[in-house]
Image (cartoon, grey):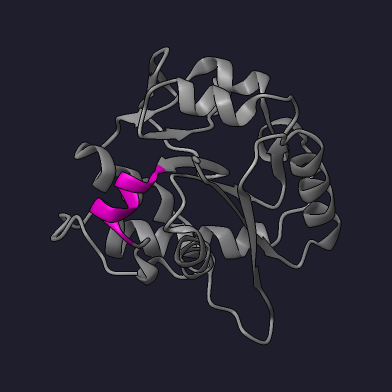
Amino acid sequence: MVSIGVGVTTFNRPECLKECLEHISKHTFTDNVKIYVATDTDEDRRGVAFRKNECLRSLKNCDHIFLFDDDCYPIKDGWIEFCINEGSEHLLFMDDKLHRKMDDKNYFDCGGVFMFMTKKVIDRVGAFNEKFMQYGFEHAEYSNRITGQRTHYPTNINLKDYIYAHDYSTSNHKSSITDEEKQIHIKNNWDKFFNEPIKSVFLPL
């Protein structure tokens, strides 16, 4: 039987987490599903990459793995089947309003609110790079290691029929960190880490 792993990362947004889990439950009818929630806290602030790895460690033996931010969730039945049947080993949810499109299945820019990957990806690529710490570019660097390319991020334009992300749809949506914090992390991660050549595709979980 095919096994499905769903990981959710969350930080200081219990209302978002509740909404996310409710939608996952409402629109998931596949048997053999494992759900894991990785929670960052003010007392144990480890960052997005660390918490995504926490999800992967719990879900790495699943055949298909889905990672959500807490403010992103499925809105339609069949979302799992859509991703699996699309035929790619890795997909991201992206939006034309924020990301430059290369074609219907590839973008120049990367979104990290939702990621789909197969077990083969986990076996080949392993962990997110935790040097990215709290925020920014960990998802793009991970995708680069999967595809072997930069600025070539895989999606399907019809995925928006199944997945909703507050980041792309709600102008007054509450972020888990301030805009000032975001800009500090983005600049630090871009300057110090993201532009470095990738030395190893695989990082152990």
| In this picture, residue 159 sits left or right of residue 29 | left
Which stretch did the figure color magenta? 118-126
Does residue 124 belong to the magenta stretch?
Answer: yes
Q: Position of residue 48 (x, y in %)?
A: 53, 64
For this rendering, which residue is in front, 43 or 2? Answer: 2
Q: Which residue is at a point 36% across and 27% down the rendered structure image?
A: 88
Q: Which residue is at a point 52% across and 45% down the rendered structure image?
A: 3
* Residue, far top: 104
Q: Position of residue 42 (x, y in %)?
A: 69, 81
Q: Is residue 99 visible?
A: no
- In terms of image quadrants, where is residue 73? top right
Q: Which residue is at a point 78% across and 56% down the rendered structure image?
A: 17
Where is 72 relative to 60, above or below? Answer: above
For this rendering, which residue is in front, 131 or 189? Answer: 131
Q: Is residue 149 visible?
A: yes
For this rendering, which residue is in front, 31 or 153? Answer: 31
Q: Give the mark count.
A: 0
Where is 72 relative to 47, above or below? Answer: above
Q: Position of residue 21 (x, y in %)?
A: 77, 50
* Residue, far front: 1
Q: Which residue is at a point 39% across and 70% down the rendered structure image?
A: 130
Where is 18 relative to 105, above or below? Answer: below
Q: Position of residue 188 (x, y in %)?
A: 39, 65
For this rendering, which residue is in front, 2 or 42? Answer: 2
Magenta span main SS: helix
